[in-house]
Amino acid sequence: ADAVVVNAGTSAGREDFTKSILEEIGRVAVHGVAMKPGKPVVLGVVRGKPLLGLPGFPVANMRAAEEFLGPLVSWFLGISPRANLRRIKCKMARKIRSEPGFDEFVQVKVGRVGDELIAVPLARGSGISMSLVRSDGDVRIPADAEGVVKGDEVEVFLRGFDVDPEGTIIAVGSHDVALDILSSHLRRVDSRYSLASSNVGSISGILAIKEGICHIAGTHLLDPKSGEFNIPYVISLIGKEDLALMHLSWRLQGIMVQRGNPKGIRDFGDLTRKEVSFVNRQRGSGTRLLLDHELSSRGISSDEIQGYEREVFTHTQVAAAVASGTADAGLGIKAAAKALGIDFVPVTKERYDLLISSPFSRTPAFEALQRAVKDPSFRREVEALGGYELSDSGKIISLEGWSAEV
C-alpha cells in the first residue's frame, strides 16, 4: 500500500484503539488537530508508510478526508490540493459564532438575491449528515477569528461545478419544520429549484428582506394591540412597498414538558417554581416575544424563571433539551414535541406567514414555490406532524390599509 486509512476508527473515547495500536507497531505523529469538525484525526507512520485515522461522525469524517487524505493523494499524483475546486465570493446570510483556536468549516447553500450571491449556513455538527447532502460547499473560519458577521464577504469552496445559485430560494427568519418538508415538495414540483433556510427569528428575517439578503422570511409575530399577526411588525420595521405576505399555516404553540409531565407544569406560573428549569428561544424570535407577552400579562418577571437566559434557535432544539432532561420545559410548537415523544401543554394558535419581496414574487421560482405550498400532498404531510392547519396555505395577504403602529 502507498498509504493506510483507518475509517471511523478514531475519537476521544476509551474505545479508541487506533492510537494505541499505532503506537505499538509504528509512530504517532499527531492525535487531534485544531479544526472543527474533524478534531480527533490521528496521523502516523508504520513501516515507512503514512497512516490516517479518520473520525466516525460523517461530517467530521468527510472534513478530515478532505483536509488530510485529499492532499496526500494529490501529493502522490503531483497535483495541487483542491486545485479543481471552484471558489466564489458571497455575502453571509447571518452571523456565525466560532470558537477561537480552531479552523472551523461551515457547510453552506448558495443563492442569488438581486445582484448578490448569498451563502446560507447550514446546521453545524459532526453528525448532521444532511448538511453534506444539502450543501453547495463550505466556508473556512480561521482559528484567529471569533466568527463571521452577517453581510461579511466570504470565500466559498464549491463542492462541484454543477452548483446553480440561480435555482436556490433563500429563506431567512423564523424556524418551522414545515419548511424542511416544503423543500422536498418544491423539488418535486420543479426540480430546478431548492429551498435553503437559515433560522434567525422573525424580526431578523424581516430585516433580512430589507437588507436584500433573502427571498422569503418566515414570521409569526403577534401584535397585542391589534390582535393581528405579522402585518403591523412588517410595516413598522420596513414599510409595505414592494412586499407581500403569503400565508403558510396556522400552528399550535405551547409549553413542551417531559413525558408524563413529572413536574406538573400546566401554566406559565409553574415556570417560576425553583425545581423547574426552562430553555428559551433567542431574542427576536416570535416564540420569545410570545413568551414575554404571556409573562407580562401575568405579572411574571423573567428573573423568576430558571433558564430564561438559555437560548436555542429552533423548536426542535427546545424539544431536544426537554426530551434529554437538560430542561423541564420550553415554549414551542406541538409538531416538535410530538416528533420527540414529549408532552405538550397548548397555549395559543398562531399564524405563520412568509414575507416576500415583490421582485421575487414575479419570478418563475416563486410560482414553483406557491404551487408547492398549495399542493394537497404537502398540506397533508405537514398536518400529519400535529398542531398544523393549512387550508389557506398559499393565500396572498394584502398589506394595504394598515398603519405602521405596533
Image: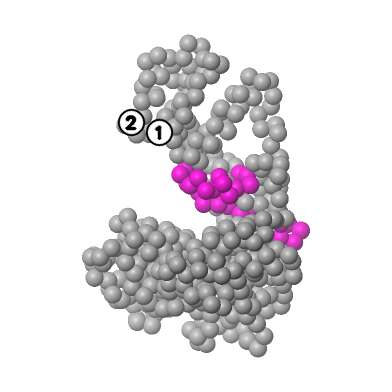
Please state if 359 lies on the left or on the right of 98 as rendered.
right
- Name the residue tied to disc 1: 11
User: Which disc is residue 15 wearing?
Assistant: 2
> In the image, which residues are magenta?
112-138
Residue at point 33%, 63% (across, down) = 342
How packed mark 1 is, by other alpha carbons closer than 10 Å (few <14, some 14-19, many 20 or more), is many
Compute the Cα span from label 2 to label 1.
8 Å
Please state if 255 lies on the left or on the right of 34 as rendered.
left
Q: Which image quadrant for residue 368?
A: bottom right
Q: Is residue 264 above or below residue 314?
A: below
Residue at point 48%, 39% (across, down) = 58
How packed mark 2 is, by other alpha carbons closer than 10 Å (few <14, some 14-19, many 20 or more), is few
Helix, strand, or loop for circle 2?
loop
Disc 2 + disc 1, Cβ < 8 Å: yes
> In the image, what residue type sits under mark 2?
Glu
Residue positioned most to the right: 115
Please state if 300 lies on the left or on the right of 70 as rendered.
left
Percent x, y of residue 54: 47, 30
Percent x, y of residue 395: 62, 77
